[in-house]
Amino acid sequence: MIAPGPAAIPAFDAARVRRDFPILGQQVNGQPLVYLDNAATTQKPDSVIEAIDSYYRCDNANVHRGVHTLSDRATQRFEQARQSVADFIGSPATSQVIWTSGTTAAINLVAYSWGHSRLRSGDRILVSWLEHHSNIVPWQLVAAATGAEVVPVPVTDEGEIDLSALDTLLDERVKLVAVNHVSNALGTVNPVREIARRAHAAGALVLVDGAQSVAHWPVDVAALDCDFYTFSGHKLFGPTGIGVLWGREALLDAMPPFLGGGEMIEQVAFSASTFNSLPFKFEAGTPNIAGAIGLGAAVEYLAGIDRQGAAAHEAALLQRTLELAEQVQGLRRIGHPRHAAGIFSFLLEGMHPSDLGMLLDQQGIAVRTGHHCAQPLMARFGIPGTVRASYSIYNTQEDVSRLFEGIHKAQRLFA
Ligand code: PMP
């Protein structure tokens, strides 16, 4: 008898995935929509829309402490979502998954709670030049209040963090290194595990802004060995207004509350109040219940697709993009990172990014233009902004072709 060979693994089918996202079936300006603004926000599959819809239609009630059936159902769905997210990022415990309104709120939580209680005059926070404003400004605010200093880590002309410059900066004054996992402006995938190793060796903590990574490949926070990890639901096929702060349990436990109010307390008296355990200590007030349930549905959706295949598919889209870009006269790619996620940032000679963005929109192609909330990085490259096409699991090679047809047409119209 001949032993059966290994089962054939079906290739990742982006066209099939695309059908799960109802918004993508429409025409924009008379053309089938090509949505290439995924780094700003992703579209939502039916299962996420249905989870939010069914929550409001069937189970809506406030969570925790309720004695009635709807409250119990809402609480179960809300906490099940936390469990799904914990599984999705490899969190050792659900108590380490704190709901926030997004990445920005998660970073601010750490900056205020950890930063205000730990930072002193003369301490340093290192942030890379690749950072989004939301991983720069919260640190500037806490630095202004504590006397600490925010010090940028240079990036190379390729758009990668300069690791030898990082080594030079890492001394005993540094208390935290804050870096993104993927640059939203250039697509650079940063070696965050290696950065964490170097930072820890110097006695510093590491916060990773994962806003642009979690949608592209499986992230395991324990394997990355970072101290804090943050991301937003809306860039991960979930709703807006929900996000996650993940942190090491001992650190979160030792941190004082950020916002005070209902839910985050154990006992309140005018003489003094005591605080709830994790994660509730950091979840004051009525949370975004529908948002959490929607995000739970989003990560459950991703658990059902071939994520390695999806990552390879996105890499192939970027590869084709780079090939076609070579054939466009006057196109300048910004940054040439060796390891890039599906983000392509560029300029066309003689054309303002927003003009190109509008000409593409007229052809049904959605891209983002501007500084991408990364003004220091734009200044580093001496440019006011870029045009950015960013890919997701539902984009196809047809979308890439349409982008370049659109660019060529815009060039003809502009000539
Ligand atoms: N960090 C990065 C790398 C981002 O791309 C973004 C969103 N563009 C943010 C932080 C902020 O995310 P949010 O607006 O969802 O809080």
Image (spheres, rainbow, N blue to C red):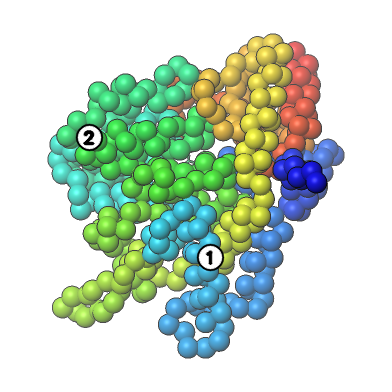
Helix or strand or loop: what does disc 1 sit on?
helix
Helix or strand or loop: what does disc 2 sit on?
loop
Q: Mark 1 and mark 2: span between their CA atoms? A: 36 Å
Please tell me whether residue 164 is drawn above or below residue 395 in the rendered image: above
Left or right: 50, with 282 as reference point: right
Q: Depth check: give the residue in front, 311 or 405.
A: 311
* Mark 2, other Cα within 10 Å: few <14 / some 14–19 / many ≥20: some
Sequence-first tag of 1 and 2: 1
Q: Quadrant of residue 6?
A: top right
Left or right: 179, with 316 as reference point: left
Residue type, mark 1 in image: Ala
Residue 222 placement (x, y as % from top left): 40, 49
Left or right: 373, with 44 as reference point: left
The disc at residue 202 is 2
Residue at point 56% right, 79% down?
A: 73
Residue 229 placement (x, y as % from top left): 41, 48
User: What residue sits right under mark 1 in the picture?
Assistant: 81
Q: Give the residue furthest to the front.
A: 1
Is residue 320 at all visible to an observer of this figure?
yes
Residue at point 19% right, 79% down?
A: 270
Residue 112 placement (x, y as % from top left): 29, 52
Residue type, mark 2 in image: Ala
Q: Quadrant of residue 396?
A: top right
Is residue 298 at all visible to an observer of this figure?
no
Left or right: 83, with 33 as reference point: left
Q: Quadrant of residue 33?
A: top right
Please tell me whether residue 231 is drawn above or below residue 399 in the rendered image: below
Q: Is mark 2 within 8 Å of ligand 1?
A: no
Residue at point 18% right, 38% down?
A: 123
* Mark 1, other Cα within 10 Å: few <14 / some 14–19 / many ≥20: many
Q: Quadrant of the C terminus?
A: top right
Mark 1 and 2 residues: CB-CB less than 8 Å, in contact? no
